[in-house]
Amino acid sequence: MTEVLFYHLENRPLEAVLPALLQKTLERGWTAVVQAGSAERLEALDTHLWTFTDESFLPHGTAADGFEAEQPVFLTTDDANPNGAAVRFLVDRAPPPLDPAAYQRLVLVFDGGDPDALAEARAAWKRLKADGHEVTYWQQTARGGWERKA
């Protein structure tokens, strides 16, 4: 079954958290797909991943860039997986895929300040757990790290 991680944002925004999660994914030798909830968010993330730090960048691309199958991190707003990613990140209220078993890991990152995002994350947790997937819940600490809560 697929390992599903829920990351509850409370103290740091997605832009501060996503690059580190993606870097860890690439360090493990995995490719990733990041599915955003809107084209605007996708464009903002695309720009951010090139400039989030002066020392490095995250190699990634979108359908507009071409070479989709060769991208270590592919950004999309739909259920595409052209790079055969092992890990799928769902941000900005993007829904879980209908077939989570297509991935080794799903990572749902949701905004704890958005009641709709919280409700959707709870519903996804219940469904994925009922389907037999290994689900874990991670909450941000005051210092920006992560603490496993369930």
Image: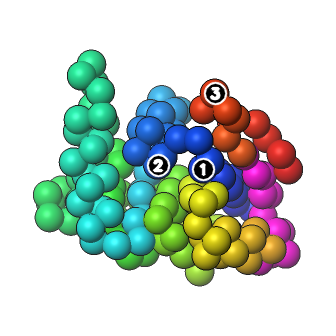
Instruction: Determine contact: label 2, label 3, CB under 8 Å.
Output: no
Q: Which residue is at the front of the view, 53 or 104?
A: 53
Which quadrant holds residue 111? bottom right
Say if 54 sits above or below 91 in the image.
above
Q: Residue 14 carries which label?
A: 2
Q: For the view shown, which residue lies furthest in the bottom direction?
A: 98
Question: Is residue 113 in view from this perspective?
Answer: yes
Residue 99 position within the rendered picture, expressed as x and y whole percent measured from the top left: 60, 76
Q: In this figure, which residue is indicated by the disc labeled 1? A: 9
Residue 17 position within the rendered picture, expressed as x and y whole percent measured from the top left: 49, 40
Q: For the view shown, which residue lies furthest in the left direction?
A: 65
Say if 14 sits above or below 78 in the image.
above
Q: Give the range drawn in magenta.
A: 127-138
Instruction: Determine contact: label 2, label 1, CB under 8 Å.
Output: yes
Q: In this figure, which residue is indicated by the disc labeled 3? A: 143
Under mark 3, the amino acid is Arg
Q: Residue 145 carries which label?
A: none
Q: What element carries label 1?
A: strand
For residue 117: magenta?
no
Question: Is residue 71 in view from this perspective?
Answer: no
Residue 77 position within the rendered picture, expressed as x and y whole percent measured from the top left: 35, 72
Which mark is nearer the camera, 2 or 3?
Answer: 3
Of labels 3 and 1, earlier in sequence is: 1
Q: In this view, does 20 lie to the left or right of 48?
A: right
